[in-house]
Image (spheres, helix red, strand yellow):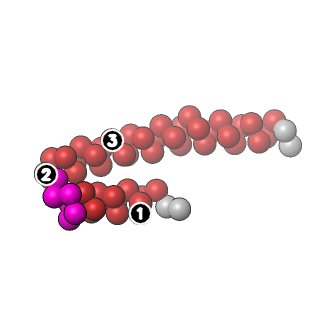
Amino acid sequence: MDFKFEAKSYLKYLEMVKNVSIHTIRNYAIDLDSFKDFIELNILKNKKTSNKIFK
């Protein structure tokens, strides 16, 4: 699963189906990008570290 593709699909859904404002879409995009950064830095980094410990 590609996060960028899924995020863009969700933002397009909000625009086309839910008819939300462009400001809402922009802010959701910012929030999704921040969430992705958090996951990469905190969750995935720790997962790689823990895998190295047990190998």
Is disc 2 placed on a helix, strand or loop?
loop
Q: Residues within 10 Å of mark 3 (few under 14, many from 20)?
A: few
Q: Nearer the viewer, mark 3 or mark 2?
A: 2
Q: Amino acid at mark 3?
A: Asp
Q: Is residue 10 magenta?
A: no
Residue type pointed to by label 2:
Ser
Relative horizontal placement of residue 46, taking residue 53 as reference (left or right)? left
* Residue range (magenta): 15-20
Badges 3 and 2: C-beta atoms under 8 Å apart?
no
Q: Secondary structure at mark 3?
A: helix
Residue drawn at point x = 53 percent, y = 43 percent: 40
- Name the residue at 16% across, 53% down: 20
Q: Which residue is mark 3?
A: 31
Q: Overall secondary structure of the magenta stretch?
A: loop
Task: Write down the residue under mark 2.
Answer: 21
Q: Earlier in the sequence, mark 3 or mark 2?
A: 2
Q: Which residue is mark 1?
A: 5
User: What is the distance, in whole Å, between disc 1 and disc 2 at their CAs?
Assistant: 21 Å
Q: Is residue 48 left or right of residue 19?
A: right
